[in-house]
Image (cartoon, coloured by chain):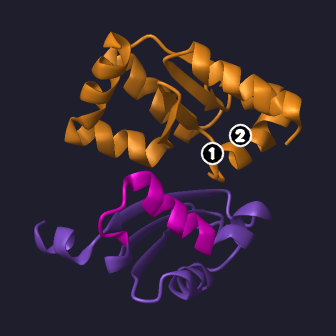
Amino acid sequence: MISPDQVESMIKAGIPDAEVAVQDLTGGGDHYQVAIVSSAFEGLSLVKRHQLVYEAVNSAMSSEAIHALSLETNTPSEMAAK
Amino acid sequence: MSPETKAKIDSLIEQNKIMVFMKGTKLMPQCGFSNNVVQILNMLGAPYETLDVLADPEIRQGIKEYSNWPTIPQVYVNGEFLGGSDILIKMYEDGDLQETVEVALAS
């Protein structure tokens, strides 16, 4: 279990320019949905983008503090086009 | 990951054009995310093989290292890691998945 703020700061530590919106899906602090916008995703496949985020939260994933993490990853230009 | 586990994963993704590592089985997925993947592949009508990681702790840990991906389910198409539940859903919504699967099955 981990707080939404902790999730956000872990991601920002790994991806400094990231804009992060964290949603706790169950209220239990272990199923999260996170939307991230960062220029670091530019030119990367979805797999690579998610791997970048997983790396940032690796310690919480491997300790199973986070059980499920649903990700939406966009670049600033993709967001602008929406 | 032991060499045996790696060899087993190698052979599974080599022998099956679409290979899904999931929790539970096609008929009884034991996790909502695994269920998402099964439902999408069923809708496409594509033939695919699954392995229940709950019944195989070695693979359950091994596949995370193998793919550098910390969660289950994991989908391989033509020997390449395609992604987990979020990616499959997005590819399906964007229409990319149908194409990827058709190309894989035709090869």
Q: Which residues are magenta?
A: A41-56
Q: Which mark is residue B63?
A: 2
Residue toward you, B102 or A73: B102
Point out residue B16 in the picture as x, y percentages from the top left corner.
55, 15
Prevailing secondary structure class for the magenta stretch in the rendered image? helix
Q: Quadrant of residue A37?
A: bottom left
Q: Residues within 10 Å of mark 2 (few under 14, many from 20)?
A: many
Residue at x-position 36% and y-position 65%:
A73
Tag 1 secondary structure:
helix
Point out residue A80 in the picture as x, y percentages from the top left corner.
13, 74
Point out residue A71 in the picture as x, y percentages from the top left corner.
45, 60
Above or below, A36 against B21 in this view is below
Residue at x-position 89% and y-position 37%:
B2
Is residue B26 visible from the viewing direction of this image?
A: no
Is residue B107 visible from the viewing direction of this image?
A: yes
Same chain, labels 2 and 1: yes
Above or below, B83 against A4 in this view is above
Q: Amino acid at mark 2?
A: Ile
- Please indicate whether residue A81 sits to the left or right of residue A32 in the image: left
Chain ID for orange: B
Kindly identify which residue carries mark 1. Answer: B67
Residue at x-position 41% and y-position 77%:
A21
Residue toward you, A46 or A69: A46
Q: Is residue A54 magenta?
A: yes
The tint of chain A in the picture is purple
Q: Amino acid at mark 1?
A: Ser
Q: Quadrant of residue A42?
A: bottom left
Tag 2 secondary structure:
helix
Residue at mark 2: chain: B
Q: Quadrant of residue B95?
A: top left
